Amino acid sequence: MLWLGLGLAGALVVCSVPVVVAVAFLDRGPGAEASTSPRPVSSPLAGDAESVTQLWLRERMTDVLNQQAAALLRGDERGFLAAAAAKSPAVSVLRRQYRSLRALRVTVWQPRISDLPARAGAEWTVAVSFGHCFALPGCRAARVAVPTRWVETAGVPRLVAVEPSPSAQDGPRPWEVSDLLVAAGRRTVVATTAAQKPRLGTLLNEAEQAAAVADRYAVDGTPPDRYLIFYAGDAEWKRWYGGGRPDWTAGYAVPVGSGHFDVVLGARDLHSTVLDDLLRHEMTHASSLPDEGYRTGANWWLVEGVADHAAAGGRPVSRYESLADVRRLVAGGWDGQLASAEPGEGAADWQVSAAYGVGYLAVRHLVDRYGLADVLAFFKAVVHERHSLEQASTDVFGEQWQALHDDCASYIRSAGS
């Protein structure tokens, strides 16, 4: 997550990637996958077991969803909405999703049903997952699972409800629940709601510039195929991706599967003077972190320090915004341990600022001493390959970690004196 008390930002990444089993996808368009589920030969007969009806119904639902996917990709709103029962709540939800997905330039839409539908009175319930790509046709599809409700009439199932993805960590996605306005550049796609429309052009321009910086922090030399940035008003901030971030958060990057990260910025109190720093920080998380994200813990200082090094944009240490708070931390008896730098949810603004300052200054010292390429190799060893700091330091820097850690702590104390 990203803090903004004094105009600085950082991100804590969380990950929850739904796991599903493929069934049928009949459309052989871009990104389509082969069926792994046999088709029932005929419709259920009187006296058949419930499971026969469930298998048959799942296949009929899959047919409907494949037809809907084809309509979405060809830009046929009426065909997309045909999956819904007339006058049902699903109609308005699907209409909003269609417009937002088309605005995001959806290129892949892969429906899957893994479970058998469950009877609920006159309706049927089942989770549907959708693999999706935006802007580029050849990307690895991210996937999201949503609860659905259906009715079946004369052998044809139709949706009556499409609910938001329930994950508290990565759902609902903005396109599930909001009408989005979108602008796209060469390296980025930015999206927001109508209330924030006046900022859309500025967001795109800043994001395109930030991408050039974030690309340099891709530890394997392969930056994201496209950065996707959502700009949230107060209501959206509380709802998108589960909400619930600490009060000091101003933005975050969340892994959504298949190596994709969505970047979210909060509109509240986000002044134009810090927008560029915030974008560089969060987009660097998207370019530098493992596909599944990373739960930071003792290495929080390294993850956030690298992102803040990008955010600083090459400015001298003397112009780093949190330097005064680092001085306050040092003067208050800082214990000198990088592993304990991460701030708690109830931390005061100055404590959050100082914590990010500790990470930035440690990484800045390592970059000044060894160069960015070696620091990114160290980052890869620790964060991607899960090597210990001791092993990574010896392998990459040729130094014992404890000595190097103490040297970083001395530098932080000196910068904060």
Image (cartoon, helix red, strand yellow):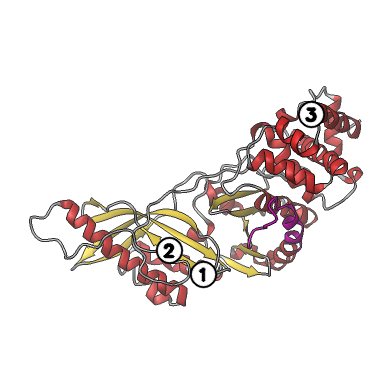
403 or 274: nearer the viewer: 403
Quadrant location of the C terminus in the rendered image: top right
| Foreground disc of the pair 1, 3 | 3
Taking 154 as reference, is 391 left or right? Answer: right
The location of residue 155, given as percent across then percent down, is 20, 67
Q: CA distance from mark 1 to mark 3?
A: 49 Å
Mark 1: which amino acid? Thr
* Residue 218, position as x, y percentages in the image: 70, 53
Say which residue label 3 marks: 400
Looking at the figure, which quarter contains the N terminus? top right
Q: What's the residue at 84%, 46% (across, down)?
A: 371
**Label 1 crowd (10 A; few <14 / some 14-19 / many >=20):** many
The mark that comes first in sequence, 3 or 2, is 2
Residue 213 colored in magenta in the image: yes
**Dot label at residue 110:** 2
Residue type at numbered disc 2: Gln
Magenta stretch bounds: 209-225
Indicate which disc, 1 or 3, sits on the residue closer to the N terminus. 1
Quadrant assignment, res 64: bottom left
Residue 227 in the figure: left or right of residue 317: left
* Residue at image mark 1: 107
Image point 30% across, 58% down: which residue? 37
Dividing the picture into quadrants, the one containing residue 69 is: bottom left
- Is 62 located above or below residue 114 in the figure? below
- Please state if 128 lies on the left or on the right of 107 as rendered: left
Q: Secondary structure at mark 1?
A: strand
